[in-house]
Image: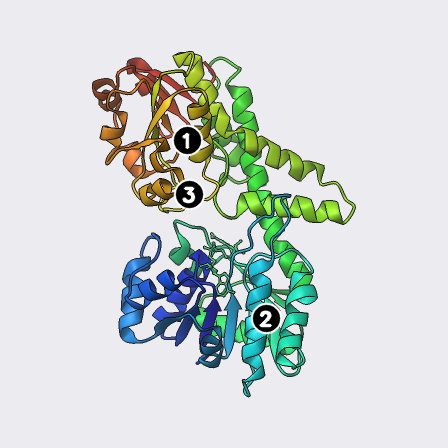
Amino acid sequence: MHQISFIGMGYVGLCTGVCFASKGYKTTLSDTDKVKVDSLNKGVSPFYEPNLEEMLWEAVNKGCLKATLGRGEAISRSNITFITVGTPSKPDGGIDLRFVRSAAEEIGRALKKKESHHLVVMKSTVIPGTTEGVVKPLLEKRSGKRCGTDFSLCVNPEFLREGSAIHDTLNPGRIIIGEHDKKSGDILEDLYREFYRCKMLPIVRANIPTAELVKYATNAFLAAKISFINQIANICEKIPKVDVKTVAKGLGLDKRIERLFLNAGLGYGGSCLPKDVKALIAFSTALGYDPMFFRSVDEVNEAQPYRAVELARRTLGDLEGKHIAILGLAFKPNTDDIRESVSMKIIDKLLEGGASVVAYDPAAMNNTKKLLGNRIDYASSAIECIKGVDCCIVATEWNEFRQLRPDDFVHHMKTHIVVDGRRIYDPEEYSRKLKFTAIGLGQ
Ligand code: NAD
């Protein structure tokens, strides 16, 4: 059985690592963050993800999963290493390869001391050319070995979604393998065939830059679907009695289009879609090609969170002195991740307009407190959050918020104004009892 290591134990490294360990693979995770490493070795997840905590606890107790600060130790305990460090945006939108470079150097140094064959797999999202142009030379330079003969190299983009990361890792739709050479691709395909056993997974093998581009093409397409339906939603709001939800239903039944990713709302956030679209724009621009379409996708998304503020203003009037509740801080349900969350943009705009804000989220309170401190108030439940406020904006579609009934808002709010930014409430039911507005709902 292969022995696996991950360099970088964020959402991708940790969730994928735990899945390998749960199937009995000896798995080692390495990170530069001592708090994360210590937490993991105690069987405690450093972040929230459904099912992660239980699987992590079991894997650590069975002795299948270990975390370490030493990259060298991770490499020596394994024969396959996945690079899963972050690839954030630079201020100009281009990809920041700082973590990728340091990971490649550290792996290269560790490979120098290793005698047995090793496969290095780039799982982080990187622009085409990175693995062959940056990672491979660093690995070769630091190890003094040759790629393709002394060690193997692949790209294997990750498609898991936060909020269902464990499920997605155990049930992927496809596997993309970008191979430096046939032997490299064969080792990785063997690992996945063994891991998924009888599941007949489509595996696409390609050269390295092609595999790198598949990831960007996927995220740009998903982002485009979201910006597309959001733009339709903004048009719907100008046509009496038209509701984007029905438009999306009619549209999504077309097999060529498909219903997924056609939920109008306040735009996409998180650590992937925004940065990947921006990186693709910066990358194409640097190649001398103007990606007009992707620029528009990004522009629509940048503006979309402010639709919620506009809708609030329409009923509330001037924001100055108003007390506004925000339900939902995570960038999507079932995660505590607030990276590029639309709620943060909405809160900034409300505060700028002179309103005061109280917020609640089932999982992301601690992360938000770290980011916003005392700029806003925090509630310990959805009901406490809406008590005495002039307006409530629903910014994340947690199931907990779907349980609220119009009477809950009527009983607890000072002024009964609700803005449904994620289309979780029935407009007819809510409009009967409240001043109700929603994204994509023609008045
Ligand atoms: P993350 O920011 O949550 O975690 C990255 C981790 O890498 C951090 O814990 C950091 O401390 C660690 N790190 C940085 N440099 C290191 C080094 N030299 N050695 C060891 N550890 C180091 O990132 P993430 O969300 O897991 O994303 C990782 C990559 O996967 C990114 O390229 C991202 O675009 C891609 N991706 C993310 C998701 C997702 O849903 N989060 C999905 C698909 C792909």
Q: Are marks 3 and 2 in contact (CB under 8 Å)?
A: no
Q: Which residue is label 3 attached to?
A: 338
Distance, label 1 to label 3, CA atoms, is: 16 Å
Identified by mark 1, the residue type is: Arg
Count residues near mark 3 (Cα–Cα under 10 Å), then give few for <14, some for 14-19, many for 20+: many
Please determine whether, in this image, residue 322 is positioned above or below residue 372.
above
Q: Which SS class for mark 2?
A: helix
Name the foreground residue: 357 vs 342: 357
Q: Which residue is label 2 attached to?
A: 105
Q: Which residue is label 1 attached to?
A: 422
Color encoding of the figure:
rainbow
Name the foreground residue: 427 vs 266: 266
Please identify, in this view, whether the residue under mark 1 or under mark 3 is nearer the observer. Answer: 3
Please determine whether, in this image, residue 199 is positioned above or below residue 223.
below
Residue that protrudes farthest toward the left in the picture: 411
Of the residues under marks 1 and 3, which one precedes in the sequence?
A: 3
Please determine whether, in this image, residue 330 is positioned above or below residue 416.
below
